Amino acid sequence: MSSKDSRFSLLLLEPYEIYFEDFHVDLIEQADASITDGKLKICSKSIVFEPKQIEKPLLKLSYKDCFSIETCKDHELKNTLLEVTTSQYVEMLEENIIAPFKFENQHQKKFKFQLKYVTIEDCIPKIEQLRRAATLPIHEQNSMISTIAYSWYNRINFDPLWFENIYEKVIIESTVNLIKPLVTNPGRLLLTNKLLYFQSFNNIQTDPVLKISLSNIVHLMKRRFMLKQIGLEIVFNQGCKKVLFIAFITDTIRDKFYDEIFQQPNLSIENLDCESIIIKWQNGEISNYDYLLYLNSLADRSFNDLTQYPVFPWILRDYTSQTIDLNDIKIYRNLQKPVGALNEDRLGKLKERYTEMDEPKYLYGSMFSAPGLIIFYLARKFPELMLCLQNGKFDHPDRIFNSISETFKNCMTNMSDFKELIPEFFDTSKSDFLINKKKINFGHKWDGSVVNDIQLPPWAKNSASTFIQILRSALESNYVSANINHWIDLIFGYKQRGEEAVKSDNLFYHLCYEGSINLSNVTDLAARHALEVQILEFGQIPKQIFTTPHPQKLIHAKLHAVSCSVESFAVELIKSFTSFKDSILSLFYSENILISTGKDGNIKCFNIKENTQIR
């Protein structure tokens, strides 16, 4: 069975659990001695048996539930027979159907695995180490697993035959983790003067190494990961735009790798000057949707990290009418206030609680964006994420994302629900997250109705694509264009923290803000684990990228042709400068200083008297 055909996924494990390697085995059934061909996956907190027959379930045996993992001494094939005795095992993907895991509890259940091409000595030492780690407190367990993993990684080499040509020169390499939602996959990142290589330390990927030509890299951004400045996100074109999110061991290694990549002559990174992007957005050259995506990226938000997933605002507040008029400002949410402050009665109760708190105080005990909230919205498209985060279970049918209007109502009234939206609500190519295309059985609600597709507002005419298109049109409307700067101030700007956050009723739990704590400096293992759990449950506030009020978008009124007479006058050319690629949008002149802004988003400053460009 190739990795391409495999049903095994890292999302079948605990969040961020490590998969090491696998072995070809036969599972010998205890009852009738029948044999099931498959693979035994060795992971950091469990072993998983993946049968070759697609109708049979995968079996997961957690080390913490195992009484013993040893060679079967009383068997003639004892050198190749592994016996696992456990009190509980988990069945997953029976008939290859995505469904809640089945937890089977027994007093003592024995599993016998016949190793095919290796002996017991090839696998049991590592399994025994990992099983011993499972007996430790969780924070010590993670530390021991890291030590075991580090020792294992150091024995894996990079095959020089993977190089594109013999003239490539290795610049720098490092052990890293490839990050995807709820998943970490260890590997090696290696930079040459021509390409960037990622070598996975296991066989979870179809190809043993991913090759990225330096000339295909579009963006390179430093990222925060789990409250540590150790992330690097690489955007590259390889048939289509792809993204690689890498977490390094330390920020020093990350920074050195980042600098070395930028020194390579084959690199051609697109310049994204923030000032130029703002001007382009103000002048309507960049849509509100694309600009918010840009700000999210600037603030360390990534589609690969659920603790820092891109955040978008609720735009409309009418989800019950039969029709909707986007020219009516009464249908729009007040973008000058955070979600928690939109309901005055609820805000009053939150402030009462706030005044009675000890320092450090906060208004909101839950975030506007967190892993659980992202999965709440995406459960139909990515049900595996919910099963991974919630220990193999779907949420209660009445708590699953069922209705747009009910979800908005809850965000306006519930004392612990202040969530915003995600970009998918405004992406006209991704309305499928609102539809139960995979026919997942999420159960029945209290009224007996089946949880299926999302219940849309009447004005969407029962069409997910129509709903998304209307939301996108609302996002690009004149009202939102004129007011979205206030929401930017709250989420990414000067009202995010400090006195301005207090004045704006925009105060969250202090540990969720960037800079409140650096996990790399936390040496106490128990304290570090507690913080990691909090991040996974609560999420993180975006990085603050503006400390002054964000400028408003320019709303261009339609021009009407009028007839008028203009007197002619003479113009004398005094000085000339050539620096803009496109037309000039505005000019300002004062005391020999000429400032101009171009349609390309650039600002230029000239000293007329000295005939020089000073900016």
Image: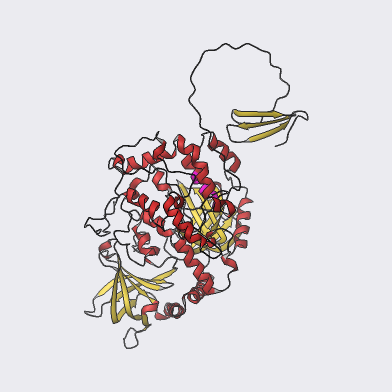
Q: What type of secondary structure mainly makes up the magenta span?
A: helix
Left or right, 191 with respect to 427, comes to right
Q: Looking at the picture, how far across and down is residue 615, in whole percent?
A: 70, 37
Q: Looking at the picture, how far across and down is residue 463, in whole percent?
A: 29, 42
Q: Quick one: 296 or 344, which is closer to the camera?
A: 344
Res 444 → quadrant:
bottom left
Asked if residue 191 is positioned above or below residue 319 in the image, the reply reads below
Q: Looking at the picture, how far across and down is residue 25, in whole percent?
A: 33, 73
Q: Is residue 468 visible?
A: yes
Left or right, 584 with respect to 204, comes to right
Q: Quadrant of the N terminus?
A: bottom left
Q: Looking at the picture, how far across and down is residue 557, in whole percent?
A: 49, 27
Asked whether residue 328 is drawn in magenta, I would say no
What is the span of residues highlighted in magenta in the rendered image? 292-299
Task: Kindly identify the residue that appears in the image at 51 percent across and 72 percent down.
Answer: 146
Asked if residue 256 is positioned above or below residue 101 in the image, the reply reads above
